[in-house]
Image (cartoon, rainbow, N blue to C red):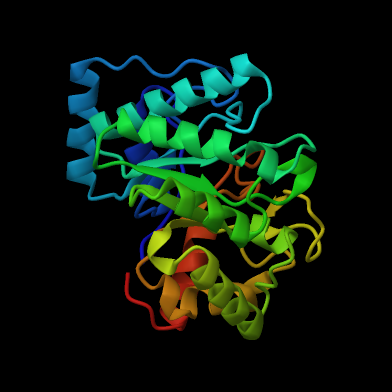
Amino acid sequence: MRIGAHISTQGGLQTCFERAKAIGAECVQIFESAPQQWGTARLTDEQVEEFRAEAKSSGIGPIFIHGKYLMNLASADAKIFKTSASTLRSSLNIAGRIGAAGVIFHTGSHKGLGLEAVFEQICNAARGVLAETPEDTWMIFENSAGQGGTIGSKFADLGQVIKRIDNPRAKVCIDTCHAFASGYDLSNKDGVAATVEELDREVGLENVAAIHCNDSKTELGAGRDLHENIGEGKIGRAGFEAILGHKAFAKVPLLLEVPGYKIGGAPKGPDKPNIDALKEIRAAVGVKP
């Protein structure tokens, strides 16, 4: 089990490693370019070599790319759909170049049409992208909090997509805040056990590539995507003890996407106190790094 975080790449992709080391992160997630704009990074061979060299010397990994927030494989708008598929393809190609494990992304929203109406569109697009991208990269679907017709709030929906794509490169990332907001009670040992049982039945534990480890500001089943620092939200320390202590996640990388604490200015996302909190819990439940 490696504990890491989403890390800024301001100043160049390779700068993430120094920032990661500063907070004690053991693995990282990055944006390859601005997440709220179309268009992916244009990396030279020299930049790719520098990134790979920094990754090797730092010992930090695995590395994940988080996809654009604009992507929506379920969109009824032909232009948005086409651009989403193209952007996902480009991001996976970048992942292959820099040695990242894959791209974690939000499937999108059916905008009230329902999953069945957009199911084939999503799966066909995914199969097409997988056919045109490096074999050593994963396409990683993230569960949603369930707001605004977003797809994947229930494990059964994610499992249905993964099974229909029928490609071992199709994986999932489980966001703990999103799962809690969708009604999966991760605040105690019994709730975590029930959640894992459903996850295994519907998706398969072998298909879980990463965990976005975030506490939740809102109540169970609230359907709102509001992340909180570890142990400060409704999941709480007991919940994360149960999550990290479950054998299903013993070898799954954990990635923080929390607001962070006010340390010398405004909070800037995942920080050392949150990393340290997860490491303390990992040690307390007897899981090896």
Where residue 270 sits: x, y (%)? 54, 48
Where residue 238 sits: x, y (%)? 63, 79
Q: Residue at x 22, y 36 (%)?
A: 54
Determine the image quadrant of residue 48.
top left
The tally of labels here is 0
On-image quarter of the C terminus: bottom left
Q: Is residue 235 above or below residue 191?
A: above
Q: Residue at x 66, y 27 (%)?
A: 75
Where residue 217 sits: x, y (%)? 76, 57
Residue closest to the eye, 251 or 54: 251
Q: Is residue 5 above or below residue 124?
A: below
Residue 6 seen anywhere in this rendered image of the structure: yes
Q: Residue at x 48, y 34 (%)?
A: 124
Q: Is residue 188 above or below residue 81?
A: below
Determine the image quadrant of residue 180.
bottom right
Horizontal arrangement in the rendering, residue 176 relative to residue 91 (left or right): right
On-image quarter of the N terminus: bottom left
Residue closest to the eye, 49 or 103: 103
Residue 229 seen anywhere in this rendered image of the structure: no
